[in-house]
Image (cartoon, grey):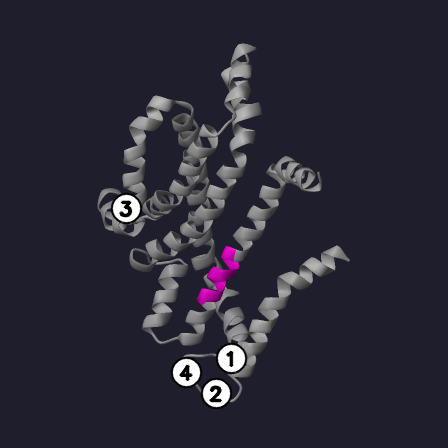
Amino acid sequence: MTALKNLAYLLALPVLLILWWWWATIGTTSFFAPTPGELVTTFVDTWFGPRFQQDILPSLGRLLVGIVLAIVLGVGLGILIGSVKRLRQLTEPLLEFFRAVPPVVLIPLLMLFLGINDFMKVIVIVSGSIWPILLNTVEGVRATDEVQRDTCASYGIRRLDRLRYLTLPAASPQILAGVRQSLSIALILMVISEMFYSSSGLGFTIVQFQRTFAVPEMWSGILVLGLIGLGLALVFRVVERRILRWYYGLREVQRES
């Protein structure tokens, strides 16, 4: 019963929006607003074929590699910077500087230094999506309970064990909050990097549809991006629930007490 209730909450608003869209496009002949039926037909005809391998799979590959690299680098550097006070004070202005620079303006520079290839597109994704993870990790490590840290040090617990059993669990809620923010940034940067410097991928294909006035196909590309974003969010929610099950359990106990 609870599963059906959750499913109803999940689908209610999308179904209402589709019904409203269907009602708004009844009898319309607008070139720029396809009906839901026309969009579904175009979506299947466009993306369930050669374009799946030519455009969707390469884009997904770049996106996933970029996200994994951003997580590894962001968490690793964040733990290092957050654990050493002097290093944190030294790097804080530099981190704030680079965080304030829009990643889009770095694309021409990265293209000049790295060339136009998949590696450049992955670096573009990493350059923008790493910051929420890095800064949240620094703050999460910094906020670790000092009494617990001193207790671990007093008992001679090794640094690696302190990191595994104290620092990472304590900082994991903020680390995952940073990862959640970085997913949407990574998707945006994947599209932007493919729009101007690529011969394949979703960003490139959507721009080609726009330039040739293939409006239903362009809408279907936007639908693909939305579905990828939804898929990432659902996968992340499952992973987050698994990693933070102790955290949600603790919050539930605190609410009941």
Which circle marks residue 31 in the picture? 4
Mark nearer the N terminus (1 vs 2):
2
* Sequence-first disc among 3 and 4: 4
In the rendered structure, find residue 35 and report the number of the disc placed on it.
Answer: 1
Sequence-first tag of 1 and 3? 1
Kind of element beneath mark 1: loop
With respect to residue 212, does 86 lie above or below? above
Nearest the viewer among 72 and 147 is: 147
Spatial distance from mark 1 to mark 2, Cα to Cα?
8 Å
Badge 3: residue crowd in 10 Å (few <14, some 14–19, many ≥20)? few
Q: What residue type is labelled 2?
A: Thr
Q: What amino acid does circle 3 point to?
A: Val
Mark-to-mark CA distance, 3 and 4? 39 Å
Residue 27 vertical placement versus 132 (above, below): below
Is disc 4 surrounded by few (<14), some (14 to 19) or many (20+) residues within 10 Å?
Answer: few
Which residue is located at x 49 percent, y 62 percent?
224
> In front: 147, or 45?
147
Quick one: quadrant of the C terminus? top right
Q: Position of residue 66 (x, y in %)?
A: 41, 44
Of marks 3 and 2, the one in the foreground: 3
**Which residue: 32% across, 42% down?**
99
Circle number at residue 83: none
In space, the residues marked 1 and 4 are separated at their CA atoms by 10 Å
* Residues drawn in magenta: 221-229
For disc 3, the marked residue is: 101
Residue 55, position as x, y percentages in the image: 43, 59
Q: How far apart are marks 3 and 2 (CA)?
A: 44 Å
The residue wearing badge 2 is: 28
Report the number of discs.
4
Q: How much space separates mark 4 and mark 2, taking CA atoms? A: 9 Å
